[in-house]
Amino acid sequence: MKLALFLVLAGLVNSYSIARDDLRGPPELPVPTRPLEWGDVNFLSTSDTHGWLRGHQHNTWPEPNYSGDFGSFASFASHMRAKADKEGVDLLLVDAGDHHDGSGLVSSSEEAAGWTDDIFGMLEYDVLALGNHELYKYEAAKWIYDRRERWNGRFLTSNTNITVEEDGKVVNVPIADRFAKFETKQGLKAHGRNITVQSPTKMAREAWFLDAIHDAPDYFVLAGHMPVRGETSEWLPIYQAIRDRHPLVPIFIFGGHTHVRDCVQYDGRTIGVVPGRYLETIAFTSSDLPPANDDGEALRMNRRYLDANDVTYRWHAGATLGNFDTDLGRNISGALAALADKLKLSRVYGDVPHDYFLTRHPYGHPRSVITVFERDVLPEALEDEWRRDIPRIVIGNAGSLRFDVFKGSFDKNDELTVSPFTTAFFYVRLKAGLGKAIADEMNRAGASKLLPMSGREEDDAHVQQVYNEWLASQWNEYVENGGDDLFENEGGQMPLGRPVPEKPKTLGYATRDACVGKGDDIEHIPVPFSPNQVDFIRTPLKGVPDDMEIDVVVMDFAVDDFLTAAQMLRPDLKLGWDNFKPYAEGTLINSIFSRYARIAW
Ligand SMILES: *[C@@H]1O[C@H](CO)[C@@H](O)[C@H](O)[C@H]1NC(C)=O
Ligand SMILES: *[C@@H]1O[C@H](CO)[C@@H](O)[C@H](O)[C@H]1NC(C)=O
Ligand SMILES: *[C@@H]1O[C@H](CO)[C@@H](O)[C@H](O)[C@H]1NC(C)=O
Ligand SMILES: *[C@@H]1O[C@H](CO)[C@@H](O)[C@H](O)[C@H]1NC(C)=O
Ligand SMILES: [Zn+2]
Ligand SMILES: [Zn+2]
C-alpha cells in the first residue's frame, strides 16, 4: 500500500470502419522492440484528447499509428493494471484535460460533447484535470460540476472555481474536489464568466494547499493542464512549495496543453511528462521509490511515448489478438460507434483524390489544404443565390482550417475536423484593387497581431505555434542530418507525388525532450514541415479590372483584421461593421467542405 497525494490544476494557460479507405487496405503497423521499464510506481497518461476517442481512421502516414480507439486504450489499461497487480506495483491512469473542441464527436454540438464525456467517463481514471477547452463555456464547466460525484472524487480542480446557485444562494465553489489523498492498491488565462482560476503561485500559498501537503505521502502526483518546460512553467511554484517541505519525496507531474510530447526533470526525484494530443500518444512514466535506508540519491525515472494503436498496445500488454479486447473496451468502442452513428459522422460526401496537408507543404503548393481551400473549395462551394453572377473575392482566416484532409472517403467527421467553426460570411462593395490590397496588408500585419485577441484565440494560436515549432525542429534536424534518400535534393520539402516511406521507418514524431534516453517507443521519420504559410487566404479573381467594384466577402472571424487593414490603407473610407451585409446567409464555414466534396470529390 502506498499513500499518494494527488493535486490537480487547470492550467493557464463498426460498420463504418469497413467503408473507410477500404480499397487501400490497412497498412502494416510497426511493432515495438523495447519493453517498458516498470518501476514501483507506473503511470499511463493522456492529455488534449479533444474528442479523438474513435482514433485516427485514415491510411495516410502517420495516421495509422494513432488508430487505436478509446476502447482499445481501455483494454490496454486493464491489461496493464492486471500486470501491475501481479507484480505488486502501482499503475495509475492520469488525464490532464482538454476533452472538447476537435473531432466530429465533440464538435457536432455541445450536447454531443457532453455525450462524448460520458463515454470518456466509462474508463476509470485515477485522476483527471480540466483543460482550458472545458472552461470557455460556462455550460461545459457546469456539466462537470453537476456530475462531479460520478468521478469518485478523482476529477480534481484545485484552482478552478465556478459560480452556481445553491439553495437560492449564489456561491463560488471549486468545480470538483481540490485534492485527493488515497491509498493505491499497491492553470489559465481564458475562461467563461462565472469561472475563476487561481494562479498556481497564489495557490501554493493557500492554507488548504499547505495543509494538504503537510504530511509526507510516499509520492506526490500533480496533474494539470500546463506545459512542464521553461523557467516560467506554472508548475515551478507548486513544485517548490512541496520541495520546501519535503526535499526527498518523489513528485510525478502530468501536464498538457501544448500538444507536444515532452519531458523534464526538475530534480533527481521529480519528473514532468506531457503526452501530446488527439489520442496520438499514451505516455508511460515509471520510477522506483526511495529504498528503506534512503541515501537521497537520484531515482531512475523513465518515460516512454507510445503510439496509440492496437499493435503497440498488444505488444506491451503481452496480449494476443484473441485475448486483448476486454468487455469494457468493447463496450466503449460500441458506445463510440453508436454515438458516431447518431451524429451521422460517417456520412460520406465524396472521395478525396489526394492527401492535402496543413503544414507539410508551403502555401501555394497544390497539395496544401490551405491552398486548395482558397483556390478550389471556396470559389466552387460558397454561393449566394442572389449575387451569383457578381464578381467577388473571399477573404478568410487560414487558421479556420484545423487538420489535414486525407486521400480516400471524406465524411462528416472529416469535415468537422478540418473546419469545425461556425463562422458566417459578410460582404462589402469595394474596388477590386482595394480588396486585394487589403488582403495583402492583412497578411503583412499577421493574424490579429495588431488587435487584442480574445483569450481563447490567443490560447489557440499559442498552442498551434508551440506545436508547429516542435514539428519544425524535428524536420529541420532530420534534413540537417542528411535526411533520407527519398527526400534527397528536395530542398527540405516532401516531393509531390512521391510516396512517403513506410519502411523501414514510418512517418511520425521524432521527439527530443529534456529527459534521459529515447522517449519515442517507435523510431520515426519526422513529418515534413514547411514554415511558409499565410494567416489569411484570398480567392482568385480573373479578368476583372482593379477599378471595378466587386463583392468583397469576408469571414466574420476576419472582419476586425480586415477593418484594421482598411483603416491603414484608406482611412478616408471610414469602413466599419455597418458597411457589411450578410453573404450567402445561413451558410456557415463548417459546411463548405461537404458542399465542395459533393461537387468535386
Ligand atoms: C507507425 O507505427 C508503425 C508501427 O508501430 C511504425 O513502424 C511507424 O514508424 C509508425 N509510423 C508513423 C508515421 O508513426
Ligand atoms: C453566473 O451565475 C449566476 C448565478 O448562478 C447566474 O445568475 C448567471 O446567469 C451566470 N452567468 C453566466 C454568464 O452564466
Ligand atoms: C474557491 O472557492 C473556495 C470555497 O468557496 C474559496 O475558499 C476560494 O477562495 C475560492 N477560490 C477562488 C480563486 O475564487
Ligand atoms: C458491457 O455492456 C454489457 C451490456 O450492456 C454489460 O452487461 C456489462 O456489464 C458491460 N461490461 C463492462 C465491463 O462495462
Ligand atoms: Zn489542447
Ligand atoms: Zn489546452
Image: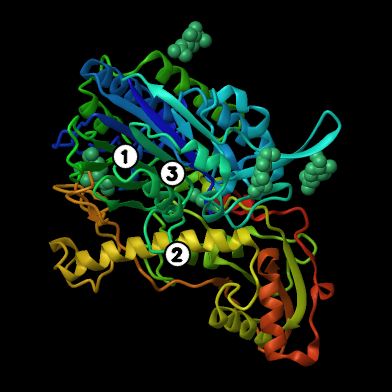
Contact? badges 1 and 3 (CB < 8 Å):
no
Q: Could you tell me the amino acid type at mark 1?
A: Val
Instruction: Kindly report the distance in space between the C-alpha atoms of the residues bearing marks 3 and 2.
Output: 16 Å
Q: Is residue 252 above or below residue 147?
A: below
- Give the quadrant of the N terminus: top left
Residue 271 on image: x %, y %: 30, 46
Residue that badge 3 annotates: 278
Comes first in the chain, label 1 or label 3: 1
Residue that badge 2 annotates: 465
Residue 424 on image: x %, y %: 71, 59
Would you identify the image quadrant in which residue 269 lies? Answer: top left
Q: Could you tell me the amino acid type at mark 3?
A: Tyr
Would you identify the image quadrant in which residue 170 lies? Answer: top right
Instruction: Kindly report the distance in space between the C-alpha atoms of the residues bearing marks 1 and 3.
Output: 32 Å
Q: Along the line of sight, which residue is nearer the eye, 418 or 288?
A: 288
Residue 594 on image: x %, y %: 58, 48
Comes first in the chain, label 2 or label 1: 1
Q: Along the line of sight, which residue is nearer the eye, 219 or 155?
A: 219
SS label for mark 3: loop
Crowdedness near tag 3: few (<14), some (14–19) or many (≥20) residues, C-alpha within 10 Å: many
At x 34%, y 18%, the residue is: 325
Q: Is residue 284 above or below residue 234?
A: above
At x 35%, y 44%, the residue is: 63
Q: Could you tell me the amino acid type at mark 2?
A: Gln
At x 28%, y 68%, the residue is: 493
Q: Is residue 117 left or right of residue 172?
A: left
